[in-house]
């Protein structure tokens, strides 16, 4: 079930302005999952879901989005699981700028998605 497309149920830190200054100041030089957002009439509209090294990945998105939410996740499969959850929560490729389903981590003999009934489809 996709919620209205604003941060509703993710339990992540944020919103935080997506600026170089904010990333330089921040203490999240770790791996995790993130949501990228812009302002909308109902709050912050989630437009992209991702995972990886937070400072590196977020820095690549400066200027494309205004805000982000994040949570730390050290284990690669945990990041994949959380990214799948958020991808499905915020509307999949139908409502997000993500055009493909999150890829499963290399070397894991697991399902293509952690969400029941999903086979890793792109929409």
Image (cartoon, rainbow, N blue to C red):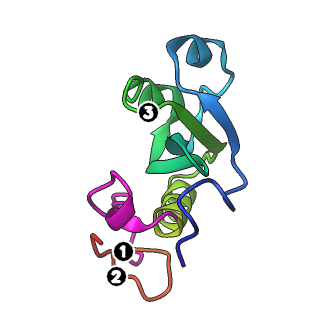
User: Residue 62 appears in which quarter of the rendering?
Assistant: top left
Vertical comparison of 6 with 123: above or below: above
Q: Name the side, left or right, on which 76 lies relative to 60.
A: right
Q: Main secondary structure of the magenta part?
A: loop
Distance between the Cα atoms at labels 2 and 3?
29 Å
User: Residue 117 appears in which quarter of the rendering?
Assistant: bottom left
Distance between the Cα atoms at labels 1 and 3?
28 Å
* Residue named by callout 2: 119
Residue 110 at x, y percent in the picture: 42, 75
Does the residue at mark 1 contact the one at mark 2 (Cβ under 8 Å)?
yes
Does the residue at mark 2 contact the one at mark 3 (Cβ under 8 Å)?
no
Residue 73 at x, y percent in the picture: 62, 48
Element assignment for label 1: loop
x 58%, y 54%: residue: 6
* Residue named by callout 1: 112
Q: Looking at this rendering, what residue extends furthest in the bottom direction?
A: 117
- Residue 65, numbered circle: 3
Magenta residues (range): 90-111
x 38%, y 56%: residue: 96
């Amino acid at each position: 079930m996709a919620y209205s497309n604003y941060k509703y149920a993710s339990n992540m830190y944020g919103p935080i302005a997506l600026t170089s200054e904010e990333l330089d100041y921040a203490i999240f030089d770790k791996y995790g999952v993130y949501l990228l957002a812009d302002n909308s009439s109902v709050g912050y509209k989630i437009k992209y879901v991702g995972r990886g090294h937070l400072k590196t990945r977020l820095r690549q998105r400066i200027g494309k989005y205004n805000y982000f939410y994040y949570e730390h996740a050290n284990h690669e499969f945990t990041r994949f699981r959380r990214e799948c959850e958020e991808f499905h929560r915020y509307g999949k490729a139908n409502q997000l700028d993500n055009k493909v389903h999150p890829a499963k981590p290399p070397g894991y003999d697991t399902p293509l998605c952690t969400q029941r009934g999903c086979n890793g489809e792109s929409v």
